[in-house]
Image (tube, helix red, strand yellow):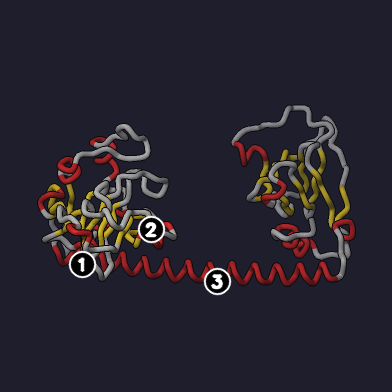
């Protein structure tokens, strides 16, 4: 995929052709702005990440000094960064960072372009083939010269800037969308709590709303076997890709459309579901099945039971 107006093959060069390792040390402990490189938060002051200072401020002479636009590779692996995070420093002030990290400056390549590349998985295969866990399984062991031999493909500077602008717009859109989602979650929580307070104020109990259903299946029934999970009610065949229940389902509980199904597992994780998908089905005898009394709206009850502060 290319933007209109650009053509030609991208150039492939080792990282070392436009990057230089930072070796400047914090002589005399002159700089006190200790940084850390986080997979999720980027390069931030150590005090913000740990809520306290970890490094000994009187003994940071061996720490590397970095400035705005410099890169830092942290070899510590995590779920968010399986080969360790590489981030660009956006701070205004000079900072210092542990000598366990690899720090480097970028020249003749758009730093933001390289930063987006390190946010992708494009470099993971190289690390898989050339790095190892060494003595510690939680860190990637790779020599500096091997890391800098990593091949990087890149287009002209004009196309680099076009790609960066596009990806930045996407990041802004994602950030706005996430903010909208967070605001809606807060609104939903506030509404839930308000509703629950109103209901509790009227002293309505589960017995007023639900009635246990004890219809049992026979040996020859033709109903679908269902499972109630944390994400909803599914046919067993749909959820597990195979039949789990035995061929003889005699004694299984019958579920009607509009019933509430309570799984015996993960009760406090909200494994309470409203059946709006199946006209009829059956569930294991260990489940609880309830019908909703006619005086109550089914959807309202289903919503109320899924809230974290329900009537339990």
Considering depth in this image, is 153 or 94 the residue closer to the camera? 94
Nearer to us of marks 1 and 2 is 2
Identified at 13% across, 61% down, the residue is 156
Quadrant in the picture for the C terminus: bottom right
> Toward which corner of the image does residue 132 lie, by quadrant?
top left
Q: Are marks 1 and 2 in contact (CB under 8 Å)?
A: no
Dot 2: what SS? loop
User: Dot 1 corresponds to which residue?
Assistant: 161
Residue 161 sits in which quadrant? bottom left
> Where residue 213 appears, x then y in whole percent?
87, 47
Nearer the observer, 220 or 181: 181
- Mark whose residue sits in front, 3 or 1: 3
Lateral position of residue 234 relative to residue 117, left or right? right
Residue 106 picture location, percent across and down:
16, 58
Mark 3 secondary-structure assignment:
helix
Q: How many marks overall?
A: 3
Give the Cα distance between marks 2 and 3.
33 Å
In the image, taking residue 197 as reference, residue 100 lies left or right, namely left
The residue tagged 3 is 183
Mark earlier in primary sequence (1, 2): 2
Crowdedness of circle 2 by 10 Å Cα count: few (<14), some, many (20+)?
A: some
Instruction: Name the residue rendered at 79%, 59% in the picture.
Output: 311
In 3D space, how far apart are the residues under numbered discs 3 and 1 (Cα atoms)? Answer: 33 Å
* Residue at screen point 27% across, 66% down: 90
Q: Are marks 3 and 1 in contact (CB under 8 Å)?
A: no
| 73, above or below 226, in the image | below
Which of the two labelled residues, at mark 2 and mark 3, occupies the earlier sequence position?
2
Under tag 1, what secondary structure?
A: helix
**Cα gap from disc 1 to disc 2, whole angstroms:** 38 Å
Q: Which of the two residues, 82 or 255, is positioned nearer the viewer here?
A: 82
Q: For mark 2, what is the residue?
A: 53
Image mark for residue 189? none
């Amino acid at each position: 995929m290319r933007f209109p107006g650009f053509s030609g093959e991208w150039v492939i060069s080792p990282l070392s052709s436009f990057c230089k390792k930072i070796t400047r040390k914090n002589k005399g402990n002159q700089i006190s702005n200790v940084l850390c490189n986080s997979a999720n938060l980027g390069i931030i002051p150590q005090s913000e990440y740990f809520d306290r200072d970890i490094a000994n401020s009187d003994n940071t002479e061996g720490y590397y000094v970095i400035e705005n636009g410099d890169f830092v590779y942290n070899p510590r692996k995590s779920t968010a960064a399986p080969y360790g995070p590489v981030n660009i420093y956006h701070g205004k002030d000079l900072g210092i960072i542990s000598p366990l990290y690899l720090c480097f400056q970028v020249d003749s390549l758009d730093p933001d372009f390289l930063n987006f590349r390190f946010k992708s998985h494009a470099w993971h295969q190289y690390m898989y083939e050339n790095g190892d866990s060494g003595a510690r399984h939680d860190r990637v062991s790779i020599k500096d010269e091997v890391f800098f031999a990593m091949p990087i493909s890149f287009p002209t500077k004009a196309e680099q800037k076009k790609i960066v602008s596009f990806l930045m717009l996407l990041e802004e859109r994602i950030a706005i969308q996430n903010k909208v989602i967070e605001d809606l979650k807060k609104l939903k929580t506030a509404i839930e709590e308000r509703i629950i307070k109103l209901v509790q104020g009227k002293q309505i109990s589960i017995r007023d709303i639900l009635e246990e259903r004890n219809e049992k299946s026979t040996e020859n029934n033709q109903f679908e076997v269902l499972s109630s999970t944390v994400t909803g009610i599914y046919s067993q065949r749909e959820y597990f890709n195979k039949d789990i229940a035995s061929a003889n389902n005699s004694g299984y509980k019958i579920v009607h459309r509009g019933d509430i199904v309570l799984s015996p597992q993960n009760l406090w994780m909200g494994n309470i579901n409203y059946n709006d998908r199946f006209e009829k089905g059956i569930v294991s005898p260990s489940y609880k099945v309830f019908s909703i009394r006619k005086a109550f709206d089914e959807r309202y009850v289903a919503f109320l039971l899924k809230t974290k502060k329900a009537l339990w």
